[in-house]
Image: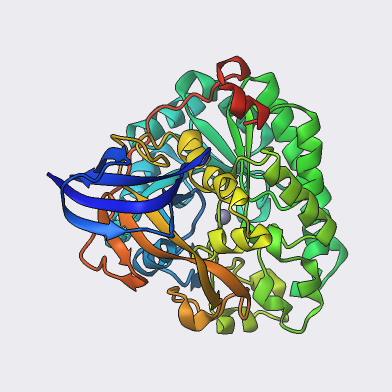
Amino acid sequence: MNDLGITGGKIFDGFRSYIANIYIRDGRITAITSDYLESKENYSAVGKYVMPGLIDPHVHFSLSLGKYRSADDFESGSVSAAFGGITTYIDFLDPVTHENEIEEKFLKRLKEAKNSHIDYSFHMTIAHPDIDPVTLAKRTLALGINSIKTFTTYSTSNRMTDNGYILDLLSITRKYGIIETFHAEDDAIILHRSKIKEKHLPQDLPFLHPSESEASAAMSIVTMAKLTNGQAYIVHNSSGLSVQMIKQLDAFENVRLETCPQYLVLNDTLYERDDAYLYTLVPPLRSRLESFYLYEALKDGSISTVGTDHCPFTKAEKFENRLNYDSMPNGIGGVETSFVLLYNKDRSEKIINDLVRVQSVNVAETFGLKNKGKIVVGADADIAIFDPTFKWTIGISNLHTKADYTPYEGRDVIGKFVSVLSRGRFVIKDGEFVGKRLRGKFVKRRKVFWPTRSEMPLFTREMNL
Ligand SMILES: [Zn+2]
């Protein structure tokens, strides 16, 4: 007998929508049918949208940054994420420089994540690496990780990886089934800008990290990825103009792009305010025009995924650095609001499948999360149930993060995730957190090979994915 039936809801699987009942046993989907089957429990989803649990490819829980630590640990972060419809996320290992640190850094994060209430994975992170790329690829895969994060900037804090190493690693990505991911900003431009002004304020962020710098680094990565037939993933694209330029290069077999909701719903006018320090993140918020182009790219499929880059700090931590940006802990929260903010840009049923693709289906496919991101028989029963009529106002008092502010305070929105299941068990049920005793699992990600254009189904080819 089935453990649970979710009946009468409208299913959005990223491509089409239809009303059906979903049945679950032992954490997996066993049937999707218009029939009513026997099950121990029934949950009526009539009038609700039922989608595969969202997958956030970019979060920073318990991120240690000098004397600061990001406000959410894996427990609070995972609860907040679940309220946002997220059932799996990918966090990061602390940066690795030498081969002998790999195991230790992996075990450290694994231990920190043990209180997560939903499933998770990690990206390997390298900084100024002194490891042979082939050894790095093999050791990373052996951990159940297939993606390696590199920084093209932050030379001053020794986190940068130079283009020589980037090229060598990119050139083996397709052979070993790994992905090289990038924080893309041109280090020389940033160094130059930071030297021009002696004193740096939060208000200077757009000057210190201009979008030209992001575009320049991204173009270099795209060029190398295309010439090596590599698998490159650029995180947190904030510049719509940069994305439009990448589009011209027609490199989507080799390059996938991620953006974040903050770059689509906020803009750089916030840096003119007295509380500009609350909006310090890198890359910074861009102009309305950049944001417009970014949203166009999201809608036309040039951007494959949406991550949140969730990395909040408290108001006090931000405030104490308001006159000295150089010691500011960068980052804002967003794991709980990502879907609803993007849904409210459009508020039509039409946008739901687009959002399910960029926030679930494509993330699973890009990073090799085989049993996630789909509503099919046999997949993990990670399911998010959304009430499209629920009206509420986003505010820190009704979010579940440990941060004490949200950049979206006071926004009236429609739609809310009311129930969320991880492997067939409720984490959120009818608006209440019920997953206290549930523990998420570390999901192993094996070798992944992105399809070439000729291997892509026609509908995804048209979407450039
Ligand atoms: Zn990040």
Q: Residue furthest top?
A: 454
Location of the C terminus (image quadrant):
top right
Residue 74 x %, y %? 37, 63
Image quarter of residue 457: top right
Q: Residue furthest front?
A: 35
Q: Nearer the viewer, residue 117 or 313?
A: 117
Location of residue 326 with respect to 123 vertically, above or below: below
* Left or right placement of residue 283 versus residue 61 in this view: right
Residue at point 69%, 38% (across, down): 302
Location of residue 243 with respect to 68 vertically, above or below: above
The answer, for residue 357, to whether it is visible in the render is yes
Q: How is the image coloured?
A: rainbow
Location of the N terminus (image quadrant):
top left
* Left or right placement of residue 123 versus residue 334 in this view: left
* Left or right placement of residue 98 versus residue 442 in this view: right
Residue at point 78%, 28% (across, down): 249
